[in-house]
């Protein structure tokens, strides 16, 4: 598969991602630790895709795939997310290319997750 069509096939919306996590699958958060600590999905595992991000450059975590491999099997189903869905697309592609068969990028990232939580809470209060 070419890059764009491959990532489209690996991407799910937040509603599907929430179902996957609710079924007991894990959520891999690829944001920097300080951003993760400021707020994250309950039970999420943090392995940053970038080791540093500055206005001038983003430095990829050279151990990313290895670190993920230490916690997830190649057949494990899990969601990959960042803040808005851009970084997690890259991380998901790297993982798929490394042989992870059931990895899914969550479109919209943590922001979409929080929005879905808020909408769910509003619906529940009506």
Image: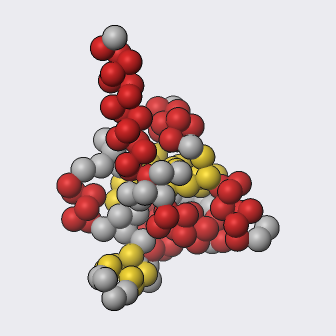
Residue sitting at the far bottom: 56
- Quadrant housing the N terminus: bottom right
Estimate the x, y position of residue 44 in percent, counting from the top left. Answer: 36, 49
Q: Using the image, determine if residue 68 lies above or below residue 113.
A: below
Describe residue 97's horizontal placement relative to residue 43 as left or right. right
Describe residue 36's horizontal placement relative to residue 78 as left or right. left
The image quarter containing residue 61 is: bottom left
Residue sitting at the far right: 1
Q: In this orientation, which residue lies closer to the viewer: 124 or 76? A: 124
Q: Using the image, determine if residue 47 lies above or below residue 20.
A: below
Q: Residue at point 46% right, 32% down?
A: 22
Q: Using the image, determine if residue 60 lies above or below residue 32.
A: below
Q: Residue at point 24% right, 50% down?
A: 39
Q: How is the image coloured?
A: secondary structure
Can residue 69 be seen here? The reply is: no
The image quarter containing residue 43 is: top left
Q: Residue at point 40% right, 42% down?
A: 113
Q: Using the image, determine if residue 109 lies above or below residue 4.
A: above
Describe residue 98's horizontal placement relative to residue 18 as left or right. right
Can residue 15 be seen here? The reply is: yes
- Quadrant housing the C terminus: top left
Q: In this orientation, which residue lies closer to the viewer: 6 or 66? A: 6
Q: In this orientation, which residue lies closer to the viewer: 7 or 56? A: 56
Estimate the x, y position of residue 90 in percent, counting from the top left. Answer: 54, 69
Estimate the x, y position of residue 69 in percent, counting from the top left. Answer: 50, 66
Describe residue 60's horizontal placement relative to residue 4 as left or right. left
Estimate the x, y position of residue 21 in percent, counting from the top left. Answer: 47, 38
Q: Residue at point 68% right, 57% down?
A: 8
């Amino acid at each position: 598969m070419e890059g764009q069509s491959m990532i489209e096939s690996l991407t799910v919306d937040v509603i599907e991602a929430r179902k996957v996590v609710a079924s007991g699958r894990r959520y891999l958060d690829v944001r920097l630790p300080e951003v993760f600590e400021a707020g994250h999905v309950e039970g999420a595992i943090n392995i940053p895709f970038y080791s540093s991000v500055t206005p001038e450059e983003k430095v990829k975590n050279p151990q990313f795939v290895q670190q993920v491999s230490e916690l997830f099997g190649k057949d494990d189903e899990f969601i990959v997310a960042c803040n808005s869905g851009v970084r997690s697309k890259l991380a998901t592609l790297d993982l798929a290319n490394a042989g992870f068969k059931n990895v899914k990028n969550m479109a919209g990232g943590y922001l979409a997750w929080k929005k879905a939580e808020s909408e769910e809470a509003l619906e529940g209060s009506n």
